[in-house]
Amino acid sequence: MDRKKLLFLIGTAMAAFLDFSVGALLATIVGSVMGEPVNIWHLIAGGILALLPDITQITMSCFKKKQIFISDHHETFDHWPILMITIWTVLLFIVGGRYWGVLTFLCMFFHYNHDMEIGNNGGIAFFAPFKWEFFTWFKGFYDPETSPIYRPENILGTWVWENWLKPSTLSLIEISLGSAALAIATSMVVNYRVSILLFAFCWIGTILVWREARS
Ligand SMILES: [Zn+2]
């Protein structure tokens, strides 16, 4: 794999980092609220649940003839929140019980809220397929084409390079929140030494990636 493609993949992973770490934190919070013993595997499972909508998309893009990641404007079936949250929550509730049902609901609800327009980030038809207008809690329904995800300068490749592979408002906020969430989750489940190490690892890794992308 060439250097540019590898950096792009790392940048995409950085964009997914906040979902994963909030999912891990939710796994510990739901565990302590519901009196369910939680271990490191619950954290990983929470992270995966919070990434589920994008995992469907990445898997599908692997089966496409040309293996390129395209910006699909969050309008394919995996980004129809009401439908997907209902299906997965019911499924995980039946298979795993109350803890997994609640966790799935919260993780996926977070993911779709995170996909809403925040700064230069995203936009989603939250009530699709019933309503195709994009939605955020602070401005209600609006025309998708006015959202950042439709702007030509924000096609996925450029968006990753401009927002994730160098320090930007978006990357600084999300890496800060994500590394803090992961540190809190691991301090509750493993111990504080591991959480400090993980926190340091997140930032050292980020800084190394930024340095490499700049050269
Ligand atoms: Zn998404």
Image (cartoon, rainbow, N blue to C red):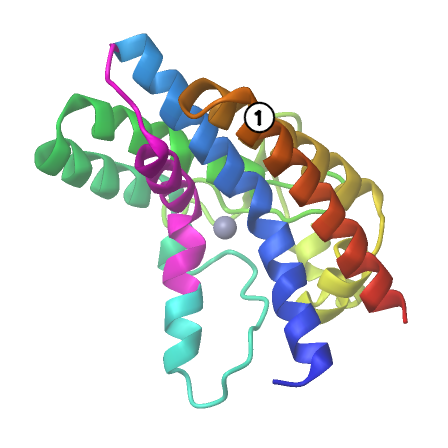
Q: Position of residue 11 (x, y in %)?
A: 67, 61
Considering every residue shown, the one lying at the far right of the view is 215
Residue at the disc numbered 1: 193
Give the residue displayed 58% in from the left and 57% down from the top. Answer: 13
Give the residue displayed 82% in from the left and 67% down from the top. Answer: 213
Q: In this rendered view, identify the residue nearer to me: 112 or 198.
A: 198
Region in magenta:
35-57
Q: In this rendered view, identify the residue nearer to me: 159 or 77.
A: 159
Considering every residue shown, the one lying at the far left of the view is 94
Q: Which part of the image, by quadrant, shows the C terminus?
A: bottom right
The picture quadrant where one finds residue 68 is bottom right
Left or right placement of residue 151 versus residue 1 in this view: right
* Amino acid, disc 1: Arg
The picture quadrant where one finds residue 47 is top left
Q: Is residue 37 above or below residue 114?
A: above
Q: Main secondary structure of the magenta part?
A: helix
Is 40 inside the magenta-drawn segment? yes
Left or right placement of residue 173 versus residue 25 in this view: right
Q: Position of residue 183 (x, y in %)?
A: 57, 28
Give the residue displayed 55% in from the left and 73% down from the top. Answer: 69
Is 139 inside the magenta-drawn segment? no
Q: Position of residue 175 (x, y in %)?
A: 69, 40
Dot 1 crowding, Cα within 10 Å, few <14, some 14–19, many 20+: few
Q: Is residue 124 visible?
A: yes
Q: Which part of the image, by quadrant, shows the N terminus?
A: bottom right
Considering every residue shown, the one lying at the far bottom of the view is 65
Q: Position of residue 19 (x, y in %)?
A: 52, 41
Element on which disc 1 rests: helix
